[in-house]
Amino acid sequence: MRWIITTIIALVAGFAGAAAWDYSGWGVDRVRADLIAEPQWLPEAMTEYQAIMMAEQIAPLRAELLTPYPGAVFGNPEGSITLVEFADYACGFCRQSLADVNALVAANPDLKVVIREYPILSADSADAARMALAAADQGRFEAFHNAMFAQDGVTVETIENAATQAGVDLDRARASIEAGEFERQLQNNVFLGQTLNLSGTPAFIVGNKIMVGAVGAEQIGEAIAEARDS
């Protein structure tokens, strides 16, 4: 029955119908009949198709995705496995996922986490993203990232509270923000997110997997293990 999965993937992906039938040795009526008899093959085919599509989306962007804004990284900076997270400080699911990511870092000494600021929820989250990149310039990114998610919401006051707790030089950070030093990075993150069709946060990318939402440490951990073995 493996040929049915291949045929379905070919059809959904828009390959020439004749080529699919040549490969399978059967016609469309036989495919339909076998799917009616054993419909469990369709979910498997769709899962494989989605995996192919994700890999094709990621491939041309991989080098850029895996290259962090200098300092906007935690875990093992030289790690052999990279987890990319698109995050918004105004996102409750990102806040919920912070413990999962930190647990994965603790459990995987070869894991490098690249955070891509993706402030799509509010103007205040964009201000927090700018402060995060200013913190990265000062080697205080992880401290700010954790402190910001510990705040009660995202406001001018909570952003400055988090920056102060993280040991950020606020005068230096404000000067960099006012000079527009982080706008290109934020625009590029939006471009990457839109190219990957990321409609929400958090979004995690590791290996050839894209996972959107608070999917939990177990699912991300499985994707990390799969990327490590590939």
Image (cartoon, rainbow, N blue to C red):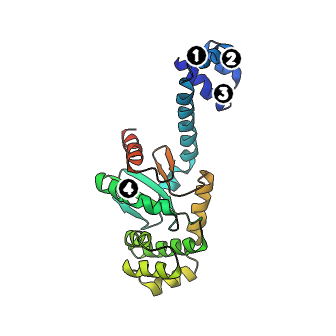
Q: Which mark is residue 175?
A: none
Q: Is residue 96 above or below residue 137?
A: above
Mark 1 sits on what residue?
37
Tag nearer the camera, 3 or 1: 1
Between marks 4 and 1, how big is the CA–CA gap? 41 Å
Tag nearer the camera, 4 or 3: 4
For this view, does 99 lie left or right of residue 68? left
Mark 2 sits on what residue?
28
Tag nearer the camera, 2 or 1: 1
The quadrant the C terminus occupies is top left
Q: Are marks 3 and 2 in contact (CB under 8 Å)?
A: no
Q: Is residue 212 above or below residue 38?
A: below
> Which amino acid, by three-letter code, is at mark 4?
Asp
Q: Rate crowding at label 1 as few (under 14), some (14 to 19) or many (20 or more) other CA atoms within 10 Å.
A: few
Mark positioned earlier in the residue sequence (3 or 2): 3
Between marks 3 and 2, how big is the CA–CA gap? 11 Å
Between marks 3 and 1, how big is the CA–CA gap? 19 Å
Horizontal and vertical percent position of residue 218: 38, 46
Q: Are marks 2 and 1 in contact (CB under 8 Å)?
A: no
Q: Nearer the viewer, residue 93 or 180?
A: 93
> Which amino acid, by three-letter code, is at mark 2?
Val
Between marks 2 and 4, how big is the CA–CA gap? 46 Å
> Which amino acid, by three-letter code, is at mark 3?
Leu
Mark positioned earlier in the residue sequence (4 or 1): 1
Mark 3 sits on what residue?
11
Mark positioned earlier in the residue sequence (2 or 1): 2
Mark 4 sits on what residue?
100
